[in-house]
Image: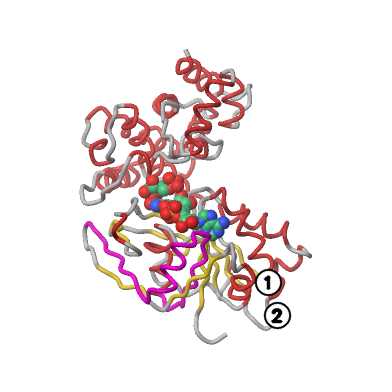
Amino acid sequence: MSALKAVHFGAGNIGRGFVGLILHKAGYEVVFADVNAELIDSLASTPSYVVTEVGDGASVWTVDNYRALNSATHEADVVAEIATANIVTTAVGPNILRFVAPLIAAAIAQRSADLPPLAVMACENAINATDLLKAEVVKALPDAALAEGAVFANTAVDRIVPGQDPDAGLDVTVESFFEWAIESTPFGAATPVIPDAHFVDDLAPYIERKLFTVNTGHATAAYHGFAAGVSSMSEAFSTPAIAAEVRAVLAETKALLVAKHDFDPEVQQAYIDKNMVRFANPELSDTVDRVGRQPLRKLGRNERFVGPAAELAERGMPSDALVRTMGVALAFDVPEDPQSVELQQLLTSLPAESFVAQVSGLEEGHPLFADVVAVVRAHQS
Ligand SMILES: NC(=O)C1=CN([C@@H]2O[C@H](COP(=O)(O)OP(=O)(O)OC[C@H]3O[C@@H](n4cnc5c(N)ncnc54)[C@H](O)[C@@H]3O)[C@@H](O)[C@H]2O)C=CC1
Ligand SMILES: O=P(O)(O)OC[C@H]1O[C@](O)(CO)[C@@H](O)[C@@H]1O
């Protein structure tokens, strides 16, 4: 292995505008793997694309030195690339990890024992997404011991990359802020060289702070915005009642984060305030439909609403604003979003208790269960 090489699954917004860019800046040749034939053909036939940052300290970056492969039609080629790569990353969505896992497993099985272990990092908005990916990879390996040929590290990725102008082609507009935190312990002394990433011993506080602040706050504005008939995120944030709902949920998640991880309350408040400014960035053209997308995932057990609300309830602490937002999220009805369509069907076909058990994963005896059932029932009536 001479030059550095990374294979990245998912050449979408985060793939091109964040992970691919950072790996490129770190000196890796990036091989993008995606199932979107049009996107892959376009990348394969275009030598570079541009990432334009907006916001404080914005820069413009040209990304080149990449290749692109269709992972639906050229599986064997993708496997061969991973087998000789230093790093494999994903930004495909947590629900898609199980589909990319068999290719990573096949590559690990094929990898020469002379090569250093493959670094595997899922870059998704989910707690411990790499653990999820690892479980699927191990399931697909002919012998679980082969997993020793890879190092699996969880990560937290933070950069708002909105839906792009359809005329932008491969170019991506992103906010200037970004944070990529990667757990260092799995790598021992051999952490990958990624200067723009930030390696931490214990990722749990970082990922929970990020998911329960950035993602909880952002999605809260999206659901309240949708319910109020607002379509852009900047309009949602400039609506005082919606901004107040966001502040209310973030006060609740702050209380949890301070109690659980011993964060300094003032530092967490500063983090909230900074994010309120990021969210409202008028230069980022973003929609409530995108930020609220896949509501069934977002209403899941370990996700941005039920996750913190359940822990608050277990500690006897209030979670009214989080529960209120879960109720408002039920109105999210976007025909182009399959999970929104399914959400609407489940709301009409299931009694409130079954809906809560199925969608939120809460059990009947859980201290949050009755509160969530109440908002579902109110929505159904
Ligand atoms: N957009 C954002 O601001 C942020 C997104 N994220 C996370 O990054 C992940 C990706 O999000 P986006 O880039 O926004 O979505 P996106 O929809 O722009 O990109 C996802 C890409 O994955 C590809 N894909 C789907 N199935 C695949 C498969 N089986 N194999 C290979 N590629 C496949 C799609 O064709 C698409 O190009 C999600 O987990 C999201 O939560 C995290 C932080 C910020
Ligand atoms: O797929 P999800 O969870 O909506 O992830 C994308 C979200 O993550 C964020 O970047 C925040 O990190 C938001 O821009 C965006 O809404």
Task: State the image quarter where residue 113 is shown.
Answer: bottom right
Q: Earlier in the sequence, mark 2 or mark 1?
A: 2
Q: Is 219 displayed left or right of 134 in the figure?
A: left
Q: Is residue 283 visible?
A: yes
Residue at point 55%, 26% (across, down): 346
Q: Which mark is residue 212?
A: none
Figure quadrant of residue 153 = bottom right
Q: Nearer the viewer, residue 86 or 255?
A: 86
Amino acid type, label 2: Ala
* Residue 180 in picture, x, y percent from top left: 42, 60
Identify whether 127 is placed above or below 374.
Answer: below
Label 2 packing within 10 angstroms: few (<14), some (14-19), many (20+): few
Instruction: Give the CA distance from mark 2 to mark 1.
Output: 8 Å
275 in magenta: no
Query: Could you say which is closer to the camera, residue 266 or residue 134?
Result: 134
Judged from this view, the residue extending furthest toward the bottom is: 2
Check disc 1 and report the residue beneath it. Answer: 149
Residues at discs 2 and 1 in contact (Cβ within 8 Å):
yes
Residue plotted at (48% across, 31% down): 309
Question: In this view, which residue lies farthest toward the right?
Answer: 143
In the rendered structure, which segment of residues is drawn in magenta? 26-55
Is the residue 359 above or below the residue 198 in the image? above
Foreground residue among 15 and 38: 38
Question: Which residue has dot 2 on it?
Answer: 113
